[in-house]
Image (cartoon, rainbow, N blue to C red):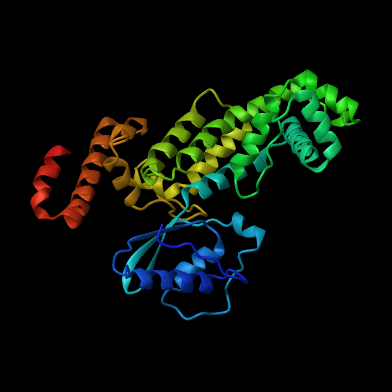
């Protein structure tokens, strides 16, 4: 980490841009930046676009909760005289995919999720209920608080509730006069159905949040795996269908780059179409070209894509390491 800054007042695009420029200048890395990854919030998009533009009046403040609803594809902007690629945050985009799915839930599945939210709030807002809950269920068996900007906190909340002893939970709720929150066996089944569909997304979110390992290389393999899982016969409900549609829409640029889909008019643009995801995946020994087998393409199409990636990788390798190493690199590919 080079810097970690906080400043008072509204976090507008121009102010974020100014803070970023100051840090870039301080460390003298103006000519070393090729990509910048931010979340998809409107003020971060604005910050990237105003590096070399004058401040205008269209800034957006960070404290607007609707910012987390914004979407963005990869954008290329001119920064400090060099071409810089602005990439959307993978974890945030996965969160938006899950939000699309959760928003589509209706009927008994929505009802049980609502009941779980109320139960979780009760354990954190009522000292009397919390005391009774821990006495009966056991100390340390509290229900996690959900965070609007971290969807997997909601997943862990649902998972924690599904793992409770329902007989003991029912006893606590009846003793404290909250019979309306008792979870029936059928509702528990609905809850576990939702958890089962969301589990791969929780694993994907955890995978891309490593502090000490490279994570950008897992983007393509993870998106392909999520798509393959959702397309399997294991998941046939409306939640899985919506998640699959949102995944292909928000990562449309990636699916088009891989030749899985034809260019279309996705409302999210060409997000994740950058070659950096291809380079990162093939240069990571954990993935290399293994993820190609998950592509719904013919063998000839896969070989063609592999040849294209090898060419892109070789050019970037020569740029970084020099011409003398290129032949050895190509031979190893």
* Number of numbered markers: 0
Q: Nearer the viewer, residue 128 or 86?
A: 128
Residue plotted at (72% across, 36% down): 106
Residue plotted at (62% across, 29% down): 195
Does residue 32 sit above or below 217 in this rendering?
below
Does residue 282 sit above or below 162 in this rendering?
below
Q: Position of residue 117 (x, y in %)?
A: 75, 38
Instruction: Say whether residue 227 is left or right of residue 214.
Output: right
Q: Nearer the viewer, residue 184 or 129?
A: 129
Q: Position of residue 238 (x, y in %)?
A: 63, 33
- Tell me where residue 101 sits by quadrant: top right
Q: Position of residue 135 (x, y in %)?
A: 80, 26
Instruction: Say whether residue 317 is left or right of residue 248.
Output: left
Q: Nearer the viewer, residue 237 or 83?
A: 83
Does residue 295 sit above or below 264 in this rendering?
above
Does residue 196 sit above or below 78 in this rendering?
above
The quarter of the picture where the C terminus appears is top left
Residue plotted at (36% across, 43% down): 217
Residue plotted at (79% across, 18% down): 167
Query: Is residue 308 at all visible to an observer of this figure?
Result: yes
Q: Position of residue 169 (x, y in %)?
A: 79, 24
Query: Is residue 79 at all visible to an observer of this figure?
Result: no
The quarter of the picture where the N terminus appears is bottom left
Q: Nearer the viewer, residue 178 or 204?
A: 178
């Amino acid at each position: 980490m080079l810097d970690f800054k906080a400043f008072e007042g509204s976090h507008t695009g121009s102010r974020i841009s100014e803070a970023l420029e100051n840090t870039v200048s301080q460390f003298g890395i103006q000519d070393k930046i090729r990509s910048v990854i931010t979340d998809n919030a409107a003020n971060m998009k604005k910050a990237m676009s105003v590096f070399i533009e004058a401040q205008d009046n269209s800034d957006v403040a960070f404290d607007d909760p609707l910012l987390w609803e914004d979407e963005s594809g990869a954008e290329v902007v001119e920064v400090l005289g060099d071409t810089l690629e602005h990439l959307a945050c993978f974890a945030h985009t996965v969160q938006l995919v899950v939000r699309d799915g959760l928003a589509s839930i209706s009927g008994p599945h929505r009802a049980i999720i609502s009941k779980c939210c109320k139960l979780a709030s009760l354990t954190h807002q009522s000292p009397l209920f919390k005391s009774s809950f821990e006495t009966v269920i056991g100390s340390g068996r509290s229900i996690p608080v959900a965070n609007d900007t971290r969807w997997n906190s909601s997943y862990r909340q649902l998972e924690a509730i599904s793992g409770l002893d329902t007989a003991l939970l029912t006893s606590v709720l009846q003793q404290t006069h909250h019979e309306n929150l008792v979870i029936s066996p059928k509702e528990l089944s609905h809850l576990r159905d939702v958890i089962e569909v969301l589990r791969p997304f929780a694993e994907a979110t955890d995978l891309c949040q490593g502090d000490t390992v490279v994570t950008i290389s897992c983007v393509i393999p993870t998106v392909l795996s999520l798509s393959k899982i959702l397309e399997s016969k294991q998941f046939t409900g409306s939640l899985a269908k919506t998640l699959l549609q949102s995944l292909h829409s928000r990562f449309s640029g990636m699916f088009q780059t891989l030749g899985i889909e034809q260019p279309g008019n996705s409302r999210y643009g060409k997000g994740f179409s950058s070659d950096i995801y291809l380079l990162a995946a093939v240069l990571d020994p954990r993935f290399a070209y293994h993820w190609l087998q998950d592509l719904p393409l013919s063998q000839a199409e896969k070989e063609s894509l592999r040849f294209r990636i090898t060419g892109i990788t070789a050019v970037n390798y020569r740029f970084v390491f020099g011409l003398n190493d290129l032949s050895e690199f190509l031979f190893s590919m």
